[in-house]
Amino acid sequence: MNRNRWILAALLVLLAIALLDRGGQDSWFSNLTGGSKESEKEPSLSAMAAEGAPKPGTAAPAFSLPGLDGKTYEVGGKRDKVLLLNFWASWCDPCKEEAPELKALAEKYKDSLDIYAVNVTLYDKLDEAKAFVKEYGYTFPVLLDEKEEVYRMFNGIAFPTNVLIDEQGVIREVIVGVIPPEELEAKIKNLI
């Protein structure tokens, strides 16, 4: 069932891209209505998504979110440690795949790396997120993005999305999807 949700979500994204991405051609709506004005063309969906996205080399957007532990966590500006923001949902199979590695990285680099697991609760159920955290033994802060506001700040398009932020508060890398554990660790080591 969870796998079907993931497939359905991917199909909806592809459908949206197909409908909105004009790629130099008239839109499907213009073709249906017989009207087409070159001056009214809008940028493609991928261009719109990339336009507002924080990019490597830019300051991370500032935000604060509540954690499962009842504390409030803030991001923005200088930090004591490198930060890995991990956007996830409990039904996401790739998130389950990388969960043990995140736990191992948190333990191995606890003196120089913070990991904030940001559950995009708008797309999840709080009870299922809590069960996920318990099952995988997360010891690092789990933040709740209940309205998807922070995920939107980072132009999230898929789970998991990992954002590496250096001690100066600058985004160094945005990783969409799962990469091999040794590759993620190498990227972290380069920042520490």
Image (spheres, rainbow, N blue to C red):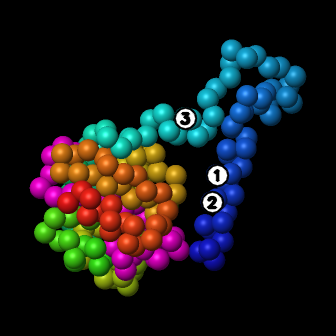
Marks 2 and 1, how far apart in space?
6 Å
Give the amino acid at mark 3: Met
**192 and 18: which one is in front?**
192
Quadrant where the C terminus sits is bottom left
Question: Looking at the rendered structure, which numbered label has been put on residue 104?
Answer: none
What is the secondary structure assignment of the residue under circle 3? helix
Q: Residues within 10 Å of mark 1 (few under 14, many from 20)?
A: some
Give the amino acid at mark 2: Ala
Residue extent of the magenta highlight: 76-102
Name the residue at 53% across, 74% down.
Answer: 93
**Circle nearer the viewer, 3 or 2:** 3
Any magenta on residue 94? yes
Q: Residues within 10 Å of mark 2 (few under 14, many from 20)?
A: few
Residue 35 lies in what quarter of the image? top right
Marks 3 and 2, how far apart in space?
19 Å
Q: Residues within 10 Å of mark 3 (few under 14, many from 20)?
A: few
What is the secondary structure assignment of the residue under circle 1? helix
The residue to which callout 2 is attached is 9
Name the residue at 62% across, 74% down.
Answer: 3
Q: From where the camera sits, is residue 181 visible?
A: yes
Question: Looking at the rendered structure, which numbered label has been put on residue 13?
Answer: 1
Quadrant where the N terminus sits is bottom right
Label 1 vs 3, first from the N-terminus:
1
Residue 3 vs 167, above or below: the answer is below
In contact (CB < 8 Å): disc 3 and disc 2 = no
Name the residue at 68% across, 18% down.
Answer: 40
Residue 181: image x %, image y %?
A: 40, 73
Residue 36: image x %, image y %?
A: 80, 20
Give the amino acid at mark 1: Val
The residue to which callout 3 is attached is 48
